[in-house]
Image: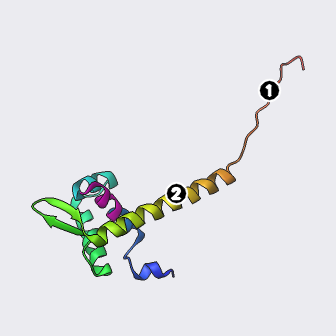
Amino acid sequence: MHRLRLSVPSANSLFVFEAAARRLSYTAAAKELNVSQPAVSKAIKLLEGTLGFKLFHREAGRLELTFEGRRLYHETQDTFDHLHSVIASLKRRNAKETVRVSFSSSF
């Protein structure tokens, strides 16, 4: 088991966090992820509980990242971007290349 599994409840919680942090809205993140707003809230609370620190300040309907939330957001984005690049590269490498040749019937 990877050590990260001891620090976060699931990889999905990082995707939920990234969407909420990027949009600074649980509602917008829920819409993007096609889940309910309470599901986003629950995932963030579980992640915060597992990590042992708050990721967001919630005041008067406004959502702001804490210092720890900003750092985790930037690192999560960089890591997701890197993984995306690696996967895209592997897909290109393994893509079957097709060569089509056509000839006239007189050939």
Please state the horizontal and vertical placement of residue 9, each as a whole percent of the image.
37, 76
Residue type at tag 2: His
99, 87: nearer the viewer:
87
At x 42% / y 69%, what residue is drawn?
A: 11
Could you tell me how many numbered marks the image carries?
2
What span is colored magenta in the figure? 17-24
Question: Does the magenta run of residues contain 97?
Answer: no
The picture quadrant where one finds residue 71 is bottom left
Q: Label 2 crowding class (10 Å Cα cut-off): few <14, some 14-19, many 20+?
A: few
Q: Which of pointers 2 and 1 lies earlier in the amino acid sequence?
A: 2
Q: CA distance from mark 2 to mark 1?
A: 37 Å
Q: Secondary structure at mark 1?
A: loop
69 to the left or right of 105: left
Query: Can you see residue 38?
Result: no
Residue receiving disc 1: 102
Q: Using the image, tell me which numbered label, if any, was put on residue 12.
A: none
Residue drawn 31% across and 53% down? 34
Q: Position of residue 99 (x, y in %)?
A: 76, 37
For the stretch drawn in magenta, the main secondary structure is helix
Q: Which mark is residue 84?
A: 2
Residue 84 rendering spot, x and y as whole percentages? 52, 57
Q: Amino acid at mark 1?
A: Ser
> Residue at point 41% right, 67% down?
75
Percent of width and height locating residue 107 = 90, 20
Mark 1 Cα-neighbour bin, 10 Å: few <14, some 14–19, many ≥20: few
